[in-house]
Image (spheres, rainbow, N blue to C red):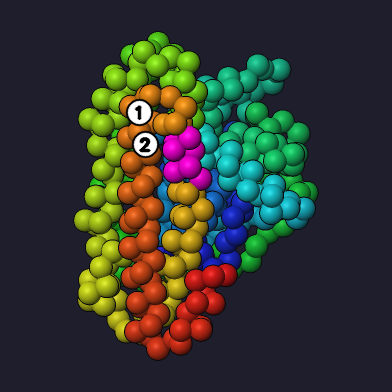
Amino acid sequence: MYLLNEKVLNKGDIVLLKSETEKSKLIRRFSNSKFSHAMIYVGESSLIDADGPGVHAHNLQRLLIPNENDVVILRSKNASLEQLRKVEQFVRSKVGTEYSMEEARKVVRNGEFVPEDNRQFCTRLVAKAFEFANLNIVEKPDYCSPKDIEDSKEFSTIQGATRAASEKEINYANETDTPIEKQAEVTNQILEEIRVLTGEDIQTFEQLDEFLISHPEHDTEITRIVTDSGYLKLWETDIRKNPWYYDFDAFTEHYPETQYASMGKWLIDLCKGLFYRFKPMHEYYYEKTIQSNNEYFKVMLGLYEKLLELNNTRMKVGIDAMIEAGLTKEEMMAIVQT
């Protein structure tokens, strides 16, 4: 078994996959593609795609690949850093959006169709993300196949896409009830309940925020839905499942001394990436609480305050690991500040 090689991945890379499931075989046959699924790497060990449960993030450490030729990594030849940030911004903004099998089927049908903009499937999500960044990678972003993306002249293929997975990594990948799976489940639950409540086709938290600004009368009930779902306490699941990221004693028990430096650096890099995600959201919800009296914005502000606090805790564990590994203060600070 194999895992994606995180060392060769950059933000904005496209990951094309295939499997031996009947669904994968059908997609490949009808679209004349080698691959059946597309994902975008957004950093911090995270991939975002649009599949049956909708648009959600996945931990690449939990994505097992049976064969090396089951995956390819594509990288834009011309995208600037600002454009890649827009690609990431787009796919993150679509998290929660429902998947449309009917829209996906139109890829292999002849005819002109009016896209259902508030629904996604994997290749549309990828192509529309690049379109949002003013990069046209395929002729029809709304209705393209994995083959269209693979054949695009806008990408180069990255070598060394996979690495062999250890037994420990395979066991980790096969765990159930993971924090990221729980987050997807709860996100879908919240948005479905809000659609029922409001009668509006609200597919993302971004759309929810816009709706509440103009419809504050729904604030109390929407806040209750979000609070009762457990969404605001999902971080507790991660602490329970991965205590070694939050406590240095647990870290030293979990990892051998030979991994202190590499895992410490990985944790620091993770925290730097998360900070640049969480901080703007904290500022955004702070502004919203100033501008309105909505309770929903207040509880979301509290969530991002907690996420930033936990991120600082993880960062300290990473720094302590680097110190324990023997790095000098200067070497460690260079890693933290880059």
Predominant SS of the magenta segment: helix
Measure how far apart labels 1 and 2 are at the Cα level.
6 Å
**Amino acid type, mark 1:** Tyr
Residue 222 vs residue 58, the one in the foreground = 222
Numbered disc 1: secondary structure: helix
Residue 245 picture location, percent across and down: 31, 65
Residue 201 picture location, percent across and down: 46, 17
Residue at the disc numbered 2: 300
Residue 58 vs residue 331, the one in the foreground = 331
Residue 49 shows in the view:
no
The residue sitting at 44% across, 43% down in the picture is: 282
- Mark 1: few/some/many CA within 10 Å (<14, 14-19, 20+): many
- Which residue ends up furthest to the front in the rendered image? 290
The residue sitting at 29% across, 19% down in the picture is: 221
Range covered by the magenta-colored residues? 280-287
In this rendering, the answer to whether 87 lies above or below 319 is above
Say left or right for 122 vs 321. Answer: right
Asked if residue 30 lies in the magenta stretch, the reply is: no
Name the image quarter holding residue 38. top right
Residue at the disc numbered 1: 296
